[in-house]
Amino acid sequence: QVYAAAATLEAAAVPDGSGAEAEACAQVAINIFEKGLAPHGADLRFVHAYADFLRARARLDELRALYERTLARVDAEDESGLGAPGGAGAGAAPTASQVQALWDAFIDLERELGSIAAVRELELRRAARHPETGDPLSAPALALRFRFGGLFPCSADEAALLGIRAGVEETDPTLDAGAEPALASTGLAAGGAVPADGGGAHA
């Protein structure tokens, strides 16, 4: 919290948020976040705060690099970077649901601001690392990949057959209780919530 607060205050030093001075303050803030990653890089709340900061300033390459570094740290096969007292991996390891939320955030970034190819690559990587998430090429997963907010690339009847309740408000998209297990390919369980990302996939 101290690192995140210090970085945010530094970035806010220039009120209008533009110009060379604002850019310099933003870089100082990034340096503070980076320093905080060493002891707190496994704390995904801190990582998400840093990610929000980068995204708000359209530093997408740095944001992608942050997600890649964090996944390599918290979702590695041997998990050697986690839980080493006093070391770079100090602190409790994140839960499985927190790691999946990190994957979701990375995929949502590419869905909104990247490309379908990037989304597909990330989904396949997650499926390879976590086979329990299901097939990312299943029909429900593809429908979710090409959604825009609460809208889906299929009719309401077709969505119902896939276990998706289409056409709902973006802030509260949900899945029908009888959804097929294949929906796990998007990190969703039957009856769970579809994350509202507010973006499209350049369909």
Image (spheres, rainbow, N blue to C red):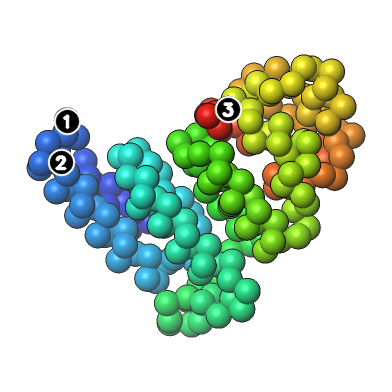
Q: Nearer the viewer, residue 85 or 61?
A: 61
Q: Which residue is mark 1?
A: 16
Q: Are marks 1 and 2 in contact (CB under 8 Å)?
A: yes
Q: Amino acid at mark 2?
A: Ala
What residue appears at the point 64 percent right and 50 percent down from the top-left corner? 123
Of circles 3 and 2, which is in front?
A: 3
- Categorize mark 1 by other alpha carbons within 10 Å: few (<14), some (14-19), many (20+): few
Q: Amino acid at mark 1?
A: Asp
Q: CA distance from mark 3 to mark 2?
A: 35 Å
Q: Residue 22 shows which numbered tag?
A: 2
- How many marks on residues? 3
What residue appears at the point 64 percent right and 62 percent down from the top-left corner? 95
Residue 157: x %, y % from top left: 84, 18
- Categorize mark 2 by other alpha carbons within 10 Å: few (<14), some (14-19), many (20+): some
Question: What is the secondary structure assignment of the residue under circle 1?
Answer: loop
What residue appears at the point 63 percent right and 31 percent down from the top-left corner? 146
Q: Is residue 138 above or below residue 171?
A: below
Q: Nearer the viewer, residue 120 or 181?
A: 120
Mark 3 and mark 2 lie on one chain; the one further toward the N terminus is: 2
Q: Nearer the viewer, residue 163 or 12?
A: 163
Residue 120 seen: yes
Q: CA distance from mark 3 to mark 1?
A: 35 Å
